[in-house]
């Protein structure tokens, strides 16, 4: 090169560097060793040729904190970061990135090395911010020495491969929380693209336990040869490419407008026509976004696809708490388990549940210090290493909870039914979170109210304690309070007794007021009728609504007592009025009505006292009998033969809420007939109902004077 030519070249480079400040923040084309970026100059960045991507420092939410990152350079609004070298370690105002003469990228915050590319002495001669969003370090022969695509953070760009040795990693949502990853998991005979929730790296768990839980899995690749990569193409299709020549592809998401299909990864020199990215978010969902320049007059990222539609399917979304899906079916809320809580403004739950199950120094069980808290309709995510034991012979959920209580290593147990077969999982930790499940119950071991650490209660023989000196004073204060509370409780009990007694007296007076008619029937007690019929031992016959028994009155006159199998659909007042009306009727061919009984339960037979038998066996031990009886009565009212007797939905809601009293319902005719026929004939009755609800006739014995009873099966 001549002296003139050298001088011209030098003048050109000088002119170039003199013009750089005029371009503000942009330095395009190749970047040579010796270049530097600083947090003090936010206008400076290394930008791709067409200005699609920028490499430099970008501020974070905290004041005077910055990330070394790659972002979309030309989009309005907040910067959308697609890669960062120090995501979880922001730097301050004195930090800088040095592309030194050895070819190494070095991020320094004062005198502290935060990040490095580790490319010293390998022949790096230039760096470039490409239009694909890939920041690349080249050697002299244009060989790629280092690239940001090979060190992804939480985002994949079109053409960026995710190989079996790489993973997307979400930023930690909090210092105490875990994080999410997307990577290839090795199955017994195949590879699978999977999302996993990982416990914090500082989590102190047993050495043989796994620290992640996979909650979503893409397609499994079996019998695949060659490199296997997950890739997002220009058209927005996302899938797994495999094979020696990348001729195999399995889609995770297929864009309808994509005709070319997935192809092998390659660095492209031109930017995509439509900006897209696929990001692993802090909430654990993998979501594909497209930039839209006109969404209701605004410019924003529009989601095209998400791996998980139900947020509660994501493990760890509530920490170790319970995820509850809201009515809109897209959002969720978190409820903490007994023994855990939310910290500060965090939405996730954390607690000491993982250390609640303690064993003594000799591995003995400290049962007296703990109790079991039941969390209804709840299941839990757990890894295989979390399972202490699995039982399939548990009859009730309470036994599953007691089994956990008796095991010192257990912190919780899950009880439920799978294909009508009970299961009980005994767990040693609770870390991945739970979710709503109507078929399961979670039992959590928590410290009992009066429990304490035995060591903390140990006192030396010569040690003094201030509370001991104050013990007499405490008694002086406590005793009057206890006595006062006892007297108040006694008064309340007396008031309650007199109130109930007064109500019964008023009810009895009302009944008697309805019996002022001369010759009206007598109101017998059920005990009287038992005595007068020798406990209903002498059966005379069977009528249409019950059985008739022989009895006698005090004057030795005989009576026939009919014990009804069903109850008229009337209230107390209407029933007594009807008895008075019948009792006032006299005819030579009619037996005179002497009296009646309407007593309580006896009325209803870069209710035999066993309502719990109808409850689902999974709920035994936790169901409230009063609520169950209420539900049963409402159910019987809803299936009455007479449509006019069936309550409206508004009345059903009020009855279930307990805001209105529920009269004892009459047994529906259909149910009575099924009971009378026996279970062996239920199938026949169902067949009759199916055959156009045909009627059937029960014919009496020829010697009986009773007429035939005729009934029909009514559709429900």
Image (cartoon, helix red, strand yellow):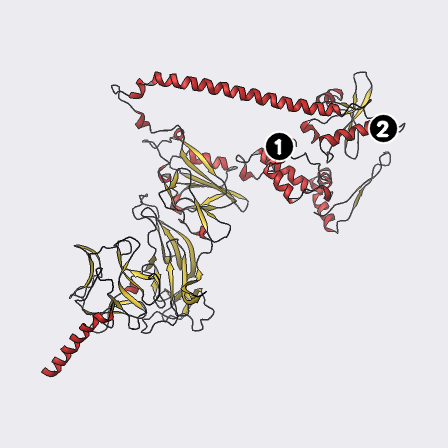
Residue 606 appears in view? no
> Where in the figure is residue 33, as x and y percent of width and height?
18, 68
Mark 1 sits on what residue? Answer: 610
Mark 1, secondary structure of its residue: loop
| Circle nearer the N terminus (1, 2) | 2
> Where in the figure is residue 270, as x and y percent of width and height?
33, 74
> Where in the figure is residue 697, as x and y percent of width and height?
80, 43
* Residue drawn at the location 19% of the way across and 75% of the way down: 16
Could you say which is closer to the camera, residue 686 or residue 348?
Answer: 348
Could you say which is closer to the camera, residue 50 or residue 691?
Answer: 50
Question: Is 314 on the left-hand or right-hand side of 567?
Answer: left
Question: Is 394 on the left-hand or right-hand side of 559?
Answer: left
Could you say which is closer to the camera, residue 404 or residue 373?
Answer: 373
Residue 580 appears in view? yes
Question: Is 417 on the left-hand or right-hand side of 3?
Answer: right
Q: In which quarter of the image is the N terminus?
A: bottom left
Q: Could you classify mark 2 by the number of other residues whose Cα lies within 10 Å: few (under 14), some (14-19), or many (20 or more)?
A: few
The alpha-carbon separation of the residues under discs 1 and 2 comes to 39 Å
Res. 272 image quadrant: bottom left
Q: In this view, does 555 lie above or below 11?
A: above
Q: Is residue 210 above or below residue 189?
A: above
Res. 255 image quadrant: bottom left
Mark 2 sits on what residue? Answer: 585
* Residue drawn at the location 17% of the way across and 76% of the way down: 15
Comparing labels 1 and 2, the label whose residue is closer to the camera: 2
Q: Which residue lies furthest to the right in this view?
A: 588
């Amino acid at each position: 090169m001549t002296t003139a030519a050298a001088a011209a070249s030098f003048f050109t480079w000088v002119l170039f560097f003199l013009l750089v400040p005029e371009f503000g923040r942009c330095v395009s084309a190749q970047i040579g060793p010796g270049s530097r970026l600083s947090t003090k100059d936010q206008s400076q960045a290394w930008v791709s040729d067409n200005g699609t991507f920028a490499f430099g420092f970008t501020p974070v939410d905290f004041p005077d904190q910055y990330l070394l990152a790659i972002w979309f350079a030309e989009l309005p609004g907040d910067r959308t970061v697609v890669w960062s070298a120090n995501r979880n370690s922001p730097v301050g105002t004195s930090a800088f990135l040095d592309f030194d003469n050895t070819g190494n990228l070095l991020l320094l915050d004062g005198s502290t090395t935060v990040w490095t590319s580790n490319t010293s002495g390998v022949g790096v001669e230039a760096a470039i911010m490409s239009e694909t969003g890939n920041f690349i370090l080249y050697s002299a022969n244009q060989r790629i020495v280092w690239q940001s695509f090979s060190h992804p953070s939480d985002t994949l760009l079109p053409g960026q491969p995710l190989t079996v040795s790489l993973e997307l990693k979400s930023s930690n949502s909090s210092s105490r929380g875990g994080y999410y990853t997307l990577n290839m998991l090795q199955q017994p005979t195949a590879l699978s693209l999977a999302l996993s929730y990982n416990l914090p790296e500082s989590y102190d768990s047993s050495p043989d336990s796994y620290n992640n839980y996979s909650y979503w899995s893409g397609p499994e690749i079996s019998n695949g040869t060659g490199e296997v990569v997950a890739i997002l193409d220009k058209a927005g299709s996302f899938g797994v490419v495999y094979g020696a020549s990348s001729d195999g592809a399995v889609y995770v998401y297929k864009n309808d407008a994509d005709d070319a299909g997935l192809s092998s990864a390659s660095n492209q020199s031109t930017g995509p026509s439509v900006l897209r990215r696929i990001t692993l978010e802090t909430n654990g969902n993998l979501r594909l976004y497209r930039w839209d320049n006109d969404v209701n007059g605004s410019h924003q990222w529009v989601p095209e696809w998400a791996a998980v539609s139900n947020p509660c399917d994501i493990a760890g979304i509530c920490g170790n708490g319970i995820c509850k899906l809201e009515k809109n079916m897209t959002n969720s809320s978190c409820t903490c388990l007994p023994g855990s809580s939310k910290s500060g403004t965090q939405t996730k739950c954390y607690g000491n549940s993982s250390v609640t199950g303690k064993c003594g120094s000799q591995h003995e069980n400290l049962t007296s210090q703990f109790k079991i808290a039941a969390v209804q309709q709840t299941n839990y995510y757990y890894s295989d290493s979390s399972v202490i034991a699995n039982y399939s012979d548990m009859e009730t959920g309470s036994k599953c909870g007691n089994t956990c209580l008796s095991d010192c290593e257990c912190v919780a147990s899950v009880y439920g039914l799978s294909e009508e077969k009970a299961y009980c999982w005994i767990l040693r930790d609770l870390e991945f979170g739970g979710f709503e499940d109507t078929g399961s119950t979670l039992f959590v071991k928590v410290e009992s109210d009066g429990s304490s650490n035995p060591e903390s209660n140990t006192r030396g023989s010569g040690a003094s304690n201030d509370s001991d000196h104050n013990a007499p004073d405490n008694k002086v204060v406590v005793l009057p309070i206890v006595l006062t509370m006892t007297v108040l409780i006694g008064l309340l009990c007396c008031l309650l007794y007199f109130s109930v007694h007064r109500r019964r007296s008023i009810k009895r007076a009302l009944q008697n007021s309805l019996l002022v008619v001369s010759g009206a029937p007598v109101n017998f007690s059920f005990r009287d009728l038992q005595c007068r019929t020798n406990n209903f031992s002498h059966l005379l016959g069977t009528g249409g609504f019950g059985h008739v028994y022989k009895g006698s009155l005090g004057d030795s006159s005989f009576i026939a007592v009919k014990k009804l199998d069903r109850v008229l659909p009337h209230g107390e007042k209407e029933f007594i009025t009807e008895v008075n009306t019948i009792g006032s009727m006299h005819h030579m061919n009619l037996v005179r009505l002497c009296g009646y009984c309407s007593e309580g339960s006896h009325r209803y037979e870069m209710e035999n006292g066993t309502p719990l038998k109808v409850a689902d066996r999974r709920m035994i031990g936790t169901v409230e009998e009063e609520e169950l009886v209420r539900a049963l009565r409402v159910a019987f009212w809803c299936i009455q033969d007479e449509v006019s007797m069936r309550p409206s939905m508004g009345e059903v809601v009020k009855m279930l809420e307990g805001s209105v009293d529920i009269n004892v319902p009459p047994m529906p005719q259909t149910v009575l007939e099924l009971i009378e026929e026996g279970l062996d004939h239920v199938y026949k009755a169902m067949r009759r109902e199916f055959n156009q609800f045909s009627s059937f006739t029960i014919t009496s014995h020829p010697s009986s004077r009773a007429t035939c009873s005729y009934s029909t099966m009514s559709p429900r």
